[in-house]
Amino acid sequence: MSHKPGQTRTQGGAAPSTVRRAEVARLLSLNSPDPHAVLGAHPTPRGVVVRALRPEAARVEAIVEGEGPREMTRVHDAGLFELLLEGRTRLFPYLLRVTYPDGNVFTLRDPYAFMPTLGSFDEHLFGEGRHWQLYEKLGAHVRDLGGVGGVSFAVWAPHADGVSVVGDFNNWDGRLHQMRRLGVSGVWEIFVPDLRPGAIYKYEIHRRGSPAFLKADPYALYAEVPPATSSIVFEPSYQFTDGEWMSRRARADHYRGPLTIYEVHLGSWRRIVEEGDRPLTYRETAPALADYCERLGFTHVEFLPLKGFPYGGSWGYQVANYYAPTARYGNPDDFRFLVDHLHRRGIGVIMDWVPAHFPKDAWALGRFDGSALYEHEDPRLGEHPDWGTFIFNYGRNEVRNFLIANAVFWLKECHVDGLRVDAVASMLYLDYSRDAGRWVPNRYGGRENLEALDFLRELNAVVHHEQPGVMMIAEESTSWPLVTKGADQGGLGFDFKWNMGWMHDTIEYFKRDPFVRRYFHNSLTFGLTYAWSENYILPFSHDEVVHMKGSMLDKMHGTREQKFSTLRALYAYMWAHPGKKLLFMGGELAQWREWSETRSLDWHLLEDRDGHAGVNTLVRDLNRLLKKHTPLYELDVEPRGFRWIDVDNALENVVAFMRLSSAGDALVCVCNFSAVTRHSYRFGLPEKGTHRLVLNTDSSYYAGTNALQIDSVEAEERPWHNQPFSAAVDLPPLTTLWFVTPAKEVFQDANEDGDHFASTSHYAPPSESEKTETATELNSTAPAKARKRATRKKAGTPDASAGDAATKAAPRAKKAAAKTEKAAAKTEQGAEKAAPGEEKAETKADLSERKSAAKFAKGAAKRGTRKKTE
């Protein structure tokens, strides 16, 4: 049979087609950049031609709206059908009726009859890396197009020769829904009519000379539960009810407000043993976690990464589905419910976010279109040697856009209140964890990753512009300067930075025998030399209770009782220290075991009223006291909010300092980190009058010994520690005390900047049932005549707020205290009182202890090993 020029002679007995042979070949090999130019309806000089590719079909008919079906002609044995409607000049709506050899008949709309769902402006913004709502365009979206419902798919794969969307809806046949490439953007797109939410899909990527491969959607809103890896079409329908919270969030001043964060791994926080030890779902977690955080007084929850991740042992830090909450605990609307519920209960939500690296799973981002697309081609730049993961290419506009739009997505669409950016240090340095010769210097020959620096600055600028009031927190473990300063100051623009140095120094100090802590006193005080170089969060995080590091309780030195006492003293010291607070789950229970992502926290420990419940109650009171007393939070990021009282008392393992507010209020923190009582310890005070004891970690209310039975001290006109007044107390061992001063103007320049009061309105107050007094604080409800100042009560009498339970526990606590005293220092009772105006002289016990310690230090230095001396 002869054919006209421009026609394609087809195989077998198929009729000739009006489309060129090369176009048909690309279409059938799935390498066509524009299948829409071949398939669908197209005007020609003779009329409108309709083409459809339906492999395996026995018959295909076109049904024009208002007309009868017309059979289409097979023009290629591979299943290309064509119909010419002569005389037609305009396009028209139509359906395809497909009949298969087994008798099955399907009537469907032609996916090649629709215009693109991305405009040229979208392509332009994406190419420049500035499309902050890109997640609304790329990925799978349920939408109405020209009055027809369906799902639009769009994916960035610039080096692919062909891309198809495949799934159960087309029997994973890449021939049926081939996508078109939009201009030079590298974006491929198609609209699949009548497809519904819940459809499982992937992208089939084709490159000439290579086998086709499947990839999950980088912009998918939902994905299967691992180990399954497909993306799922999802249409968010959850209606948030936290409008008031979001309005207040935009005006929040986190620097001057209370910020105490409870870090949570959702999969192991609580589990249901009766149902196969499964984790709670998002919706099950919401009320339980809100109740718990509200009771303990935390202002925020920080979740370890909840984006889709394939490997459970990564704790979520190897992210494969950046726009999809992990399906392990529910769907995306369930996640929104969790956030919304926490907001309604007055609790903010922070989430770990991982822009530093991503896993090498074959179905995920790596080598996405057959090339190094999201990562660098050079493994010295594109692979992380420690974690076996790929590193993002921050120099590529589209990659930066992917990440920044992702940050905006979680903060805007999911109402998350802040992002803790993981592994920032690994982004900043080109030689991070790399030996010489295994890294590539920047254009100036340095080791700084200039592209990552630009990315981080842009990230923080965009996020703060798009979502005012959110927090950007850096986990940066080096001394890189100006992390929390603005780009105009040469900084990175974060709001807060984890104080990793403080965390490590502090933990190392408390792991040591109290006898030798005097030689490491600098570990306590050094952090205050740089405490205001950044806006810091003090973290006791998940990283410190895994990999054989021991739990927080187990790290503490000494006997069981000493471990609990030390942990309580440490927490109170931390809560009084400048900086916002973060505590990983389990720390508030004083768990013995290290954390594991495979099991629940040891909730049964709270039944132990002698230790674990005491620590839990203490954490509750620390949070409540912090919210109540402005000096503990208002000037966290300003040096004028802190003043040392006793900084260099290494011999006695004692520190004392003052926290100040802009209004002149002060709170004094006194810590004894030795294992013996410091009798008649005198400390300076800023003002005369009665200083109330608002916290005593040795209170029997917290399962302490209740050795100190006072509720206040009276400041004497006796200068001490460069303060005009002072008081003396017997400091119990391993104890932290907080005193509130009566002063309102502690220093003259307190209000030099005007009335800068922290707004705490965005934090919900405790419910009426929770408004109870803390263990040691005495309010106006306590009779004035019951208050004693720096004098001992009758033996066995507890704090006024400790109640009957403390009264019953006092004899046992007193006995335990006596036993501890005897074991720690038999000669401590010979302490001498200091003369007026002078520092307290060494007691005989101190002198003996100092001599023994000097001998110990000399011997340890000589032997190079530590020897137990007490």
Image (cartoon, rainbow, N blue to C red):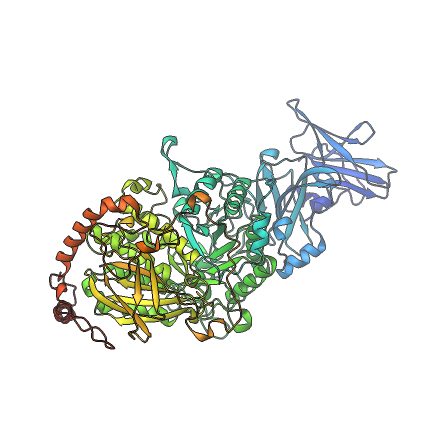
Q: Position of residue 722 (x, y in %)?
A: 32, 76
Task: Name the side, left or right, on which 853 lies relative to 262.
Answer: left
Q: Residue furthest bottom?
A: 837
Q: Quadrant of the N terminus?
A: top right
Residue 6 visible (yes or no): yes
Q: Residue furthest front?
A: 785
Q: Position of residue 113 (x, y in %)?
A: 74, 40
In this view, 85 is above or below 342: above
In this view, 731 is above or below 615: below
Q: Residue furthest right?
A: 87
Q: Quadrant of the C terminus?
A: bottom left
Q: Position of residue 845 (x, y in %)?
A: 13, 67
Q: Nearer the viewer, residue 439 or 821?
A: 821
Task: Name the side, left or right, on which 319 lies relative to 238.
Answer: left
Please give the count of numbered marks on the rendered protein.
0
Residue 328 visible (yes or no): no
Q: Residue furthest top?
A: 103
Task: Name the side, left or right, on which 671 lies relative to 764.
Answer: left
Q: Nearer the viewer, residue 729 or 157?
A: 729
Residue drawn 42% across the image and 66% down it: 665
